[in-house]
Amino acid sequence: MIINGVHIDETFAEAFPMRATRVIVTAQNLKWAHHAAQAMTGFATSVIACGCEAGIERELDPAETPDGRPGVSALLFAMGGKGLAKQLETRAGQCVLTSPTSALFAGIVEGEQIPLGKNLRYFGDGFQISKRIGGKRYWRIPVMDGEFLCQETTGMIKAVGGGNFLILAESQPQALAACEAAIEAMRRIPNVIMPFPGGVVRSGSKVGSKYKTLPASTNDAFCPTLKGQTRTELSPEIESVMEIVIDGLSDADIAKAMRAGIEAACGLGAANGIRRISAGNYGGKLGPFLFHLREIMA
Amino acid sequence: MTALSFTLKSPLRQRLDASPLVPDRLLGKSPKEIATLDLQYGNRRIAAADLFDIAGDDAESVRISGSPKLDFAGRGMTRGSLIIDGDAGAYVGMHMKGGRLCVSGSAGLYAACELKGGIVEICGNAGDLLGSALPGNKKGMSEGVVIVRGDAGDRVGDHMRRGSILIEGNAGMYLGARMTAGTIAVRGRIGACAGYAMKRGTLLVYGSPVSIGATFNDCGLHTLGFLPLLLKGYQGLNTCFSETRACRSRVRRLVGDLSVQGKGEILLVA
């Protein structure tokens, strides 16, 4: 399969089951909602060492938020429910509770309920106030700028993490330009996040390492400087490879985002140095969800 | 199907216990069984058909002629709709758990007392002890919504635990007395001793400045983030409390009742 001169490899991305939740952060204005949400989703690129993967899903109009203020929605993913609950509580407490004018609400109603303000309320030292509104419990926690309003729980659902594709280009700037175009298109798709910096990861990994303590190590088959040193997947003209990793609330959401991203990258075409699209395929060691590139782009 | 209606043949001379005339207890009954329903009328028992002209067949939707002597209407109901055409007596909606009860006139004492769920709407005025606990009990209304289009009497929400009472007119003395949680909103004026012995909960008052007890301390003027959310929750109820202007209001927060180490609040809308 070739799209605009870009070869689509006959391969597939492997993804794995995760647990996910969505939260809505509102504030006096969008700037401060972003400050809180960015802090909350910071250092959350990979479960390998961050505890969770998180990112801002999209901006919300005042009409879309529970308290009628501007806000953003963020998605958090972890390998298990306990881990997700712990990460959520820590991040909400240190990053949203602390951010001026912020309020925090559940973005998913269904599924198992995990604490949001349920334990954060104790920061109120006995002055916290509970309010049940429309069958949901909220906590009003007094803070120095007024009150921090936080819903008691949020829903946790089954999700999929680790969807990905690789962009292989003739140069580093060309690979990055294609990634930027892909990310711009993918950010319009709901229910997904691309958790790495700017949505792009340059240090794709393989499962395992020669060092026993490491669960993952550099994906040497796609490292251009190792073309003559390892069993490479790269042809001579490829000088740079970048990866986009996608976490989504369902496999269909990931497939939709992958299609949008690959379409945008291929839009630049071979004329702009984009030569191949491939994917992280680890021979079934990583997870049960398979995203075949050619099926997605058919 | 048409609403199952009970139309009084003549004005009530004694007090009538209307608690059997709720959807829960009428569903599945034949017209004959409904006609012979045994009702407590003063100090004697009487068949429903002796007091009412009965028409219609939809027991999920019940209508009863109103009377100030019609007590316990909607008692313990869990589903469906009950409309009282006119005034109702005491204990309207007592122990109600679900459904919707509407009194097109006024209601007497203890309306919605110990309410556990559902919506009670009183289009006229409500008597004393609206949404309160029964004498000797310590738990008043514990869930649900009460809407009063007119005025309410004294001791609204006495011992109230949860839920909302929305009064579009004025409220009497001892509003929210001994309240432990929940919200009471009053669009008009309120009487003296509001929040007496209140432990927790919110009194939201829109009326002109009122006299507040010395055991409530002023916490200043604030824009509280939960208020738009709270008032947005009332939007489906068609009350004056969900107007956009009301949602953006600043409020003076008074906290008390400090005589009982209370952490309740009276919010005076600026």
Image: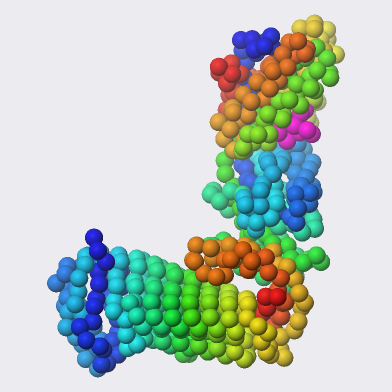
Q: Position of residue A221 (x, y in %)?
A: 76, 15
Residue range corresponding to the magenta coloring: A194-201
Observer-nearest residue: B57 or B98? Answer: B57
Image location of residue A280, percent across then percent down: 68, 21
A196 magenta-colored? yes
In this view, the residue farthest toward the left is B32
The residue lying toward the viewer, choosing from B87 and A264, is B87
Q: Position of residue A2 (x, y in %)?
A: 64, 10
Structure colour scheme: rainbow
Residue at the (60%, 84%) spot, across then down: B189
* Residue in the image at 66% along x and 48% along y: A61
Q: Is residue A162 magenta?
A: no
Residue that protrudes farthest toward the top in the picture: A236
The quarter in which the N terminus of chain A is drawn is: top right
Q: Is residue B49 above or below residue A187?
A: below
| Position of residue B235 in the picture relative to residue A82 (left or right) | left
Given residues B103 and A199, the one toward you in this image is B103
Dominant SS of magenta comes to loop
Q: In the figure, residue A295 lies in which quadrant? A: top right
Indicate the quadrant where residue A116 lies. Answer: bottom right
Mark yes or no: residue B76 visible. Answer: no
